[in-house]
């Protein structure tokens, strides 16, 4: 398909597609001359991925470039694939977390994932909460971890082992981008439901 057809298929304007090509977010089409290239379904899928990362994931262009680079050179290990997905989706760093926060996480018996993107982000978030005067208790943290283990059990499916490394990484990245807002919304729905159960009759 020509670039105009790629634009029609994805709903993305031609100038934006050309920008993605210049930025390395979209691989070039097959050359058909000095001013023409042909594109295929792989380009359609890549454009949709880029739009999802930008529109839903709120990733910067530089971070999206990291994602597509990782997708083009995925690790073979399924466990390392998940680490790669978490790394490219990491939040901007607030600096290294204090050693005391890391020691606290370890003392609670949480898995030893020292240095992983997720554990670093957790330590930074706990440190930020403490600085803001909103410390999170050990009991609350372990309760949240138990609940999120059930969520993760639904995410880390055996079918990943049968996928190609690129497909498995794509699944992990897009799965996190699209479902993180769902998990957050479900937490708030549950808060509303419990609030109604515990306080509505008392307040009326």
Image (cartoon, rainbow, N blue to C red):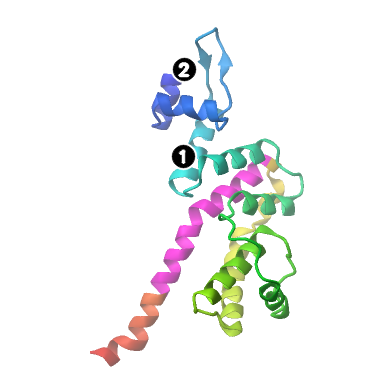
List the single residue furthest toward the top: 33
In the depicted view, which residue is nearer to us: 83 or 183?
83
- State whether residue 83 is above or below residue 7: below
**Residue at position x 50%, y 46% from top?**
59
Q: Position of residue 26 (x, y in %)?
A: 55, 29
Location of mark 2 (residue): 2
Any mark on residue 139, and which? none
The residues colored magenta run 166-190
Crowdedness near tag 2: few (<14), some (14–19) or many (≥20) residues, C-alpha within 10 Å:
some
In the depicted view, which residue is nearer to us: 14 or 102?
102
- The answer to which quarter of the image holds residue 148 is bottom right
- State whether residue 165 is above or below residue 18: below
The local secondary structure at tag 2 comes to loop
Q: Position of residue 167 (x, y in %)?
A: 64, 42
List the single residue furthest toward the bottom: 202
Q: Position of residue 47 (x, y in %)?
A: 49, 33
Residue 98 appears left or right of 34: right
Location of mark 1 (residue): 51
- Measure the C-alpha gap from mark 1 to mark 2: 19 Å
**Residue at position x 40%, y 76% from top?**
191
Image quadrant holding the C terminus, namely: bottom left
Residue 169 falls within the magenta-colored stretch: yes
- State whether residue 187 is above or below residue 137: above
Q: Position of residue 9 (x, y in %)?
A: 42, 28
- State whether residue 26 is above or below residue 171: above
**Residue at position x 42%, y 64% from top?**
185
Does the rendering let one see residue 41? no
Residue 165 appears left or right of 187: right
- The answer to which quarter of the image holds residue 111 is bottom right
The first of marks 1 and 2 along the sequence is 2
Q: Name the dominant secondary structure of the magenta segment.
A: helix
In the depicted view, which residue is nearer to us: 124 or 116?
124
């Amino acid at each position: 398909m020509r670039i105009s057809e790629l634009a029609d298929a994805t709903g993305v304007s031609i100038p934006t597609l050309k920008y993605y090509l210049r930025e390395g977010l979209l691989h070039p089409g097959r050359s058909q001359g000095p001013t023409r290239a042909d594109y295929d379904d792989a380009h359609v899928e890549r454009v949709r991925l880029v739009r999802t990362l930008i529109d839903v994931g709120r990733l910067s262009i530089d971070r999206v470039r990291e994602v597509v680079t990782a997708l083009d050179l995925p690790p073979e290990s399924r466990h390392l694939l998940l680490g790669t997905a978490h790394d490219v989706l990491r939040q901007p760093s607030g600096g290294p977390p204090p050693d005391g926060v890391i020691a606290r996480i370890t003392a609670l018996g949480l898995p030893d994932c020292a240095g992983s993107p997720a554990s670093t982000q957790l330590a930074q978030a706990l440190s930020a909460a403490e600085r803001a005067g909103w410390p999170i208790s050990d009991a609350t943290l372990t309760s949240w971890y138990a609940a999120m283990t059930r969520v993760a059990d639904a995410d880390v499916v055996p079918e990943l082992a049968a996928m190609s490394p690129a497909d498995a990484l794509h699944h992990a990245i897009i799965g996190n981008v699209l479902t993180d807002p769902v998990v957050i919304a479900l937490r708030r729905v549950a808060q509303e439901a419990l609030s109604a159960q515990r306080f509505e009759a008392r307040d009326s």
